[in-house]
Amino acid sequence: MHATPYLDEVRRRAAEAESRASAALADLAAAEAVQVALPAFTADVRDASELSVAECREQYVARFRPLLIRSIGALTDPTPWTLAWLREHCGQKCAAVNVGGSQMAASCEVAGVEVMTIDDLAQRIEARSSGRSAYLYDCSLPLKLPALCERLAVPVYFAHDWLQRTRRLHAFSRSWPSLFVGATGTRSSLHIDQWKGHFWMAQLCGAKRWTIFHPEDAWCLSPSWPSEAPRLEPTFPSLDEMEAQPGQYPLLRLARRVDVTLRAGELLLVPGGAPHRVRNGESDADPAVSVAIAANFVDGSNCAAAAADLGLMARRAAAPEHEDRGAAAAVAGLDELDEVALSADDARSAAAIGVPGVAGRVVPYGEYARGRGGEAGERREGCAWLPA
């Protein structure tokens, strides 16, 4: 395989993780003392009635801290979307559905995928049949179920997404929000989202059990970068396996982690680069179906890292003619943003919004998709882009 900047970075990340793990294994007690002395990693629980937009973005998003927000308000019409409602209103629409119950990596590698209608998905979920669980995972609403976007809003705290504020369309302009529907027993295994994207999820029905690790502690989780399909983000063993075999995975206990249950009506922020595992259901016996919407986003806190990774992804192939045009368009869009002006505008808008009232806690999808989700007051035309 020809050397490229992409492969060089994959190898650098693998070597760094291996070096840190080897040093820790050589003196576990010393490594544990170092980890204990690091800043705590917790998930605060806040109510939207007392959380300002500025505080959310400055104290949580910019500091890569998980956050659970309650009382966010109505993000969908009707509230909530249920499996029965989805079946009634878009039952004949088709989507790629994970079968076997598990999404296995950030690359969306799965136990199996079938294209089926929403009606077939509902029947499969309701039947809980033959161990072939169905999980609608990260289904783009703008691309796959666009009619639902008319009934959709985005939390004001995260509606300032810079990926929606580029001059031209790109691979991620219409990726989000996305829809997740799954019964208890379905899950996404431990993984890291691509290009350091921050992530929010709003739980509409049912519950999800989240485990989130500190972004700087992935090396404790036995990461690997398979050479046959090199990716910037590593793959990990099953978290269940690691927890069941502490002797084989002694570094797991060093990783800072939070475990949180996301329930209907709640909103979760997952910082970019944080390894996470998600299980549907409040417990393994929970009969409720989990329905959620979610999105990745970029702002001043992770734009440089996102652009760097997207740039590498665009040029992962040695031959220029094999450039990943989707990633290239995204990084080109981010590169021409005026980060200083955008950051200043975001700060002014957040200050103007303050603690949002009930009606102001959500932004209609159309405003978000036009890049106006982060605004308050008059728009200053042209401020988003550097001079040509």
Image (spheres, rainbow, N blue to C red):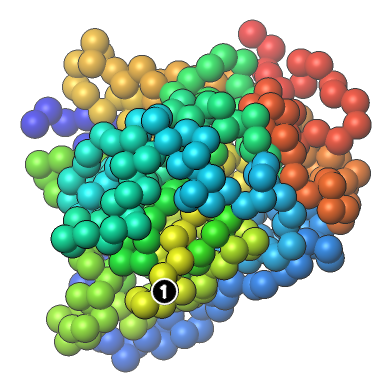
Residue that appears at 91% across and 31% down: 377
Q: Amino acid at mark 1?
A: Asp
| Residue 197 visible in the snapshot | no
258 sits to left or right of 369: left
Q: Which part of the image, by quadrant, shows the C terminus? A: top right
The front one of 313 and 105 is 105
Q: Residue 346, relative to residue 316: is it above or below?
A: below
Q: Where in the figure is residue 124, as x and y percent of width and height? A: 29, 51
Q: Position of residue 187 (x, y in %)?
A: 33, 61
Q: Position of residue 373 (x, y in %)?
A: 73, 34
Between 190 and 117, the one lying in front of the other is 117
Q: Is residue 113 above or below residue 14?
A: above
Q: Is 315 rendered above or below residue 24? A: above
The residue closer to the viewer here, 150 or 39, is 150
Q: Residue at x 44, y 61 (%)?
A: 289
Residue at which label 1 appears: 286
**Which residue is painted at 19% across and 16% down in the image?**
319
Q: Residue furthest bottom?
A: 29
Mark 1, Cα crowd under 10 Å, few <14 / some 14-19 / many 20+, is some
Residue 30 visible within the image: yes
Q: Secondary structure at mark 1?
A: loop
172 on left or right of 52: left
Circle count: 1
Apparent side of residue 302 relative to residue 312 in the rendered image (left or right):
right
Pick the quarter of the image with the N terminus.
top left
Tell me residue 257's x, y (percent).
45, 75
Q: Residue at x 39, y 30 (%)?
A: 92
- When asked about the image quadrant of residue 280, the answer is bottom left
